[in-house]
Image (spheres, rainbow, N blue to C red):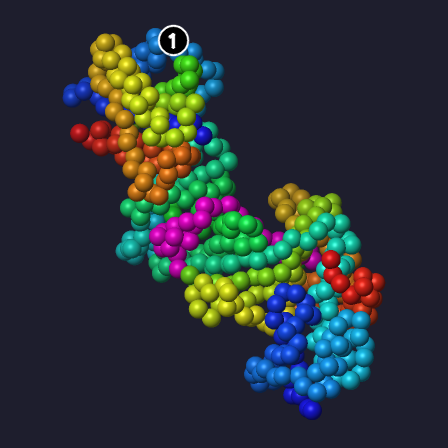
Amino acid sequence: MMFDLSFLNMCSSRVLEFDLDIIQCVDESKLKWTSFHLTDKWSALCKESLRLSRISEFLLLNPLYIIRIMHMLHVEALQILLQGLCGVPKDRVRVHEFCLKSGPNLGVVPSEVRLLCDLAQPTPTWTVRHAGGAMRGAGAEQLSVLVRSVVESKVSNNALRFFYAVGYKLDHELLKIGFAFRFQRVVPITVTVTSANRMPRLHAIDDAVPLTPGIQLVEITAPAAGDNYNEVAAAVSSFCEYLVPLLHLSKPGVSTGIVPTAAAAASSLLSNSGGKAI
Amino acid sequence: MPVKWLMHWQPNQGSTLSSQVLAEVCQCVEGFGAAAKDRKWRTTLTFYRPMARDSAAAPVSDVPRDLLGIALHDRPSAYFFILRHHRIILQADANVQLLMDKLQSYKARVVLHFEGSQYQLGDFQLRVGKCGPSMSETLRGIMMEVEYLPLSSIEKSRPIMEAFFDIWHETITKASLPGHFVISDSNFSDYGLQDYYSPQHTSLQYATCIAQLMSAGRS
């Protein structure tokens, strides 16, 4: 049985837990989605091999899947690594994000705000967020991190109605699903690992589908003031060094490839933890 | 949160507002036996106007021109936006003002302060204040905040507040002051506010109070 499918979709935020009779895949070259049933010996072997403890056997049988599965393994391994480094339990992330833009002619400049509805809480809570432009200049370029001003404010749950009323329009909405670790390491640091999901119809979060299947966004952020951002940048960069076996984090806008050690590091982390993320 | 009622001063026909009137109102409060507290209070109200992209072009249309921002003296960490036409009260953290500045879509045009002295009278806390533009001594109005500490239900407090208001009205009349206080009645249910009193109720009361003060000033 030959597959021209080179990707395994992460159908949920639980890595490597599939409805294993049907695997959805995308052919990257054609951007085509296909579902197929696993039958006969491939089915049994696939299911078994997709379990972490048998990953090496699977790799031998079907090299097409090596890289992509490793990507998914990385997320699981990243959780384990972060759990060990941070010493705090992870927080579930499930945020409905509304990107609002000012209507035509409103405002001295066009503006954008994001409304974030935290669905991980028993009662959804709302936050409005505005991010300014990145700090520029020679000093900024030397930093390994992006520095920009961000204002966030908790708001009551009629915030969307309010911003519509004052002339803002919905540009797009996303559902971000994943996890976060919030801890203190010289400064308060937040590591967020999320996938972005789009909604086929307005506000239809139950039908959200991944925007970039199999690809997660890893963000490391820390608050800073005007007079200490160098120290904060150093603390963030220093923490990022601990993640180097698995991934290289870079300034937004600068892409990195897959880390050569990632596969081995991920396997090691997973086998040490018994194949289960905490 | 204890219930508050707001009252604004309605001057008699032909009389003017002055700091003398304010001083005499304070004397009436102290005559009640109310004990003056050391701390002053201040609630700030800001009128926002929409900004057009090109200042030479026509003003931006289809956006509200009645956006009001309120910082309450007893909620320094919060800020309230009110859209009266849309019947919306948005409660936010105090730094939402900074966010609004950064958006540059609405600009603060007029800032008014309600400020003055506060008094304790049994289960009541009274705040007598003047209303005027920031950075100016101009007096735009006089108002009072009457807070009844034991109750949080607006309806349950109504008979007590009305009884207080009757006694207060009688006191003002006997002192022959050139005017009287009028209760600033707000339509809470229009804004979806419930019977249980909250800072959102207070913010709406200040928005109503300033509208009524401005109307009293015009007539």
Residue at figure coordinates x 65%, y 72% from the top left:
A18
Say how many tags the image has: 1
Q: Is residue A200 left or right of residue B126?
A: right
Chain ID of residue with mark 1: B
From what the image shows, is residue A206 above or below residue B74?
A: below
- The extreme left residue here reads B13
- The extreme bottom residue here reads A1
Q: Is residue B103 left or right of residue A220?
A: left
Residue at figure coordinates x 33%, y 35% from the top left:
B207
The part of the image, by quadrant, that contains residue B53 is bottom left
Mark 1 secondary-structure assignment: loop
From what the image shows, is residue B15 above or below residue B188?
A: above
Residue under label 1 = B33
Q: Position of residue B198 (x, y in %)?
A: 42, 34
Q: Indicate yes or no whether the magenta region holds residue A165.
A: yes
**Amino acid on which the number 1 mark rests in the picture:** Gly
The part of the image, by quadrant, that contains residue B155 is top left
Other-residue count near label 1 (Cα within 10 Å), few / some / many at <14 / 14–19 / ≥20: few
Q: Is residue B176 left or right of residue B160?
A: left
Q: Position of residue A56 (x, y in %)?
A: 81, 77
Q: Which residues are magenta?
A: A143-169
The answer, for residue B114, to whether it is visible in the render is no
From what the image shows, is residue A155 above or below residue A208?
A: above
Residue at figure coordinates x 80%, y 83% from the top left:
A60
Residue at figure coordinates x 45%, y 39% from the top left:
B79
Q: Looking at the figure, which quarter contains the N terminus of chain B?
A: top left
Q: Looking at the figure, which quarter contains the C terminus of chain B?
A: top left
Q: Position of residue B216 (x, y in %)?
A: 22, 29
From what the image shows, is residue A82 above or below residue A155?
A: below
Q: Indicate yes or no whether the magenta region holds residue A19.
A: no
Nearer the observer, B32 or B150 = B150
